[in-house]
Image (cartoon, rainbow, N blue to C red):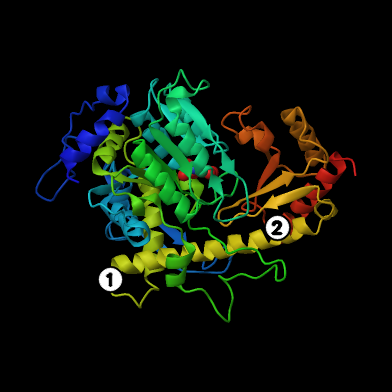
Amino acid sequence: MDYDRLKERYSKFLSKRDERRELVSFWDGDLPSKDLICLEAGMPNEKLFPIKAIDLHLVDQPFDDGDGDKVSITRYEQPAEMPIARAFQYSEVRGMLPMVSFCKRIVEMTNRPVYDNWDVLLSNGSSDSMFKVFETLCDESSTVLMEEFTFSPVVSNVTSTGASCVPLKMHLTTDPRDQGIDVEYMEQLLDNWHELEEYKRLNKPKLLYTIVTGQNPTGMTLSMQKRQQIYRLAQKHDLIIVEDDPYGYLTFPPYDPENPMKNVYTDTENPMSIDEYLQKRLIKSFLTLDTDARVIRLETFSKMYAPGLRLSFIVANKFIIDRLLNLSEITTRAPSGASQAIVYATVKAMAARETAYQDEQDRMFYGWIRWAMKLAGTYTHRRNVAFKALYETDAYKSHLFSVLEPSAGMFINVKINWPHAPPDDMRRSLDQLDTVLVKNGVKVVLGYKLAVDQSFSIDSSGFLRFTVAYASHDEQLIEGCHRIGNGIQEFLGY
Ligand SMILES: Cc1ncc(COP(=O)(O)O)c(C=O)c1O
């Protein structure tokens, strides 16, 4: 699909604010070259920076405190493509080219889109990506579909543009074929939109926002079959799909109660190969189905490297990327050069070990994926530890709660099995349970706080979400899970 066709097809999705958004620039954006004495832009010479080098001390494994590789970022030499003089200077708003190329390589190797005219834009965390996407595509006339439970700040991103959020029913189940968005519900909703009394003041949805793998907060992952069905619905009803995927690389196989600490990532006899991870463990993005260029994918370095970097990237068709770039140009400008240099130098160091590959881009990709597998292995271990600890509590053995086993990510859902009917006032009951849990020394998130529309989801919001990500060691996680069990038992009066 050529650029003009993309423009023709996707201009109608743009917000009114986007039409008015134009950069007033005094600068043509050329960076200094050897022959040009550049005295125009207010760029401090690199020797005015208070540092001349940064040393990075890498770890070999998560939780490893030993001495791993050491790599420096220097004023002019290292990394050659992104030394301090370059990375700490004002830089390209879309991201520095070596980082853009690296992100593109990740997309090509894991989720190559089925059309050619796509691109990547770096941004300041997926929170920033989401803000920019909704700013660009939404205004008062827009309606956005999303999972009934979601990463709640996104609701504010949407509503701050004047747009409305409409929740989609989810199947909260451990069955991998059935997890996540209730596709039949979505189909009925879209097919009958104009007859629906409850939504009669809203325009037909033009966007679907979905957290596709290891969903926050439910841990659900959309099966490939569901992705295909949803993509077909998006085609039929002309929706843009915004696929937020911070957890897609953190996948784990089903928990085995007979062998609770089994971990396919660290199995010394039969360790998982990179190919197996890429081909079998990672679930393909909507991008791989996207014949119409209607998918916007959000990836972030927050969970794969560190949240404080505020570094992420957006994949979309070139026309939409240009509109998002335009917004970046007048708001955040380039993502942090320091963060880009740190990630880039780290990945280059990881690449140095991948001697089996000829091409430097391949070495970087596989070096990075090897790190992703180490993280996935650590999360699998933590999932195992948490499940074992939950399943050994008296509360679990007395059926006071069940666990919605996730197949990816960092969140675990504990569903309360209310002894009689669900409480009339779910909010109040969960708040009371929370007080008991805090008294027992554990803090979790209450299901209703993550509902897009609390009254819509009241019956299914009787759950607690906790993360396995933050505990300092296994014992802390085990103790936290035991406290959850004790708190539930105390609250339900047993
Ligand atoms: C679904 C989802 N999207 C986005 C984010 C934010 O990511 P970032 O740190 O890249 O802004 C989170 C963080 O928890 C999340 O769960």
Q: Residue furthest left?
A: 35
Q: Residue at x 42, y 33 (%)?
A: 131
Percent position of residue 209, x then y: 45, 38
Q: Which mark is residue 359?
A: 1
Question: Mark 2 — residue?
Answer: 386
Q: Residue furthest right?
A: 494
Name the secondary structure under disc 1: loop
Q: Residue furthest bottom?
A: 269
Percent position of residue 278, x then y: 43, 66
Does residue 59 sit above or below 144 in this rendering?
A: below
Pick the front one: 173 or 52: 173
Q: Amino acid at mark 2?
A: Ala
Percent position of residue 243, x then y: 42, 44
How packed mark 1 is, by other alpha carbons closer than 10 Å (few <14, some 14-19, many 20 or more), is few
Q: Residue at x 28, y 38 (%)?
A: 320
The answer to whether mark 1 is within 8 Å of ligand 1 is no
- In 3D space, how far apart are the residues under numbered discs 2 and 1 (Cα atoms)? 41 Å
The answer to whether mark 2 is within 8 Å of ligand 1 is no
- Disc 2 + disc 1, Cβ < 8 Å: no
Q: Amino acid at mark 1?
A: Asp
Q: Residue at x 71, y 45 (%)?
A: 415
Q: Residue at x 37, y 29 (%)?
A: 135
Does residue 127 sit above or below 19 in this rendering?
A: below
Name the secondary structure under disc 2: helix
